[in-house]
Image (cartoon, grey):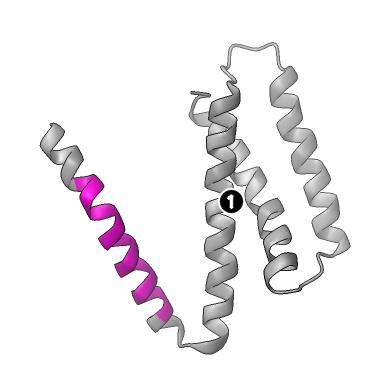
Amino acid sequence: MTGVAVGTVVAIGSAPIFAGLLGWMVRKERPGQGWTVATIMAIMGCTLLFVSQGEMTVHYKGILFSMGAGASYANYTVVSKDLLEKHHPYAVIAVVFCLSAVLLAPLAVRQVLAG
């Protein structure tokens, strides 16, 4: 809805913001000054996308979906950090990727059958 470039920038820019907030809420880790500066810069950069007069398409639903992608990645990193403190890295990666494959397999089959 917003195009690959805008969606990617918003997803990548929002992921650290969400990771800092999730780390603070879930792991009780207080974000540092570097996170605050980076968050302000990310918000400013994403705001510039909205005021752009260029040829790119910016649609609020696409922005929300991109932010959802950033939040999903942030959730993955916070949960992985917690798991890595308790389990061997190979075990964590194996479970995460196998679970992801099982969850995404129905979508892949649907896509293949749709042609």
Residue 101 in percent (x, y) is at 28, 61
State the residue in front, 45 or 112. 112
Q: Can residue 6 be seen in this view?
A: no
Q: Which residue is rendered at x = 26% and y = 62% of the image?
A: 102
Residue 69 in percent (x, y) is at 52, 45
Q: Which residue is rendered at x = 53% and y = 72% of the image?
A: 80
Amino acid bearing label 1:
Ala
Q: Is the magenta stretch mostly helix, strand or loop?
A: helix
Q: Which residue is rendered at x = 14% and y = 32% of the image?
A: 114
Quarter of the figure with residue 54:
top right
Q: Can residue 37 be seen in this view?
A: yes
Check residue 95 for magenta coloring. yes
Check residue 34 for magenta coloring. no
- In this rendering, position of residue 108 left or right of residue 1: left
Residue lying farthest front? 25
Quarter of the figure with residue 52:
top right
Q: Which residue is rendered at x = 52% and y = 63% of the image?
A: 76
- In this rendering, position of residue 92 left or right of residue 76: left
Residue 4 in percent (x, y) is at 49, 30
Q: Is the C terminus in the top left, top right, bottom left or bottom right quadrant?
A: top left
| Residue to which mark 1 is pinned | 71
Magenta stretch: give its range: 92-108
Q: How crowded is mark 1: few (under 14 residues within 10 Å), some or many (20 or more)?
A: many
State the residue in front, 103 or 96. 103
State the residue in front, 2 or 23. 23
Q: Is residue 79 above or below residue 39?
A: below
Quarter of the figure with residue 25:
bottom right
- In this rendering, position of residue 54 left or right of residue 80: right
Residue 16 in percent (x, y) is at 67, 54
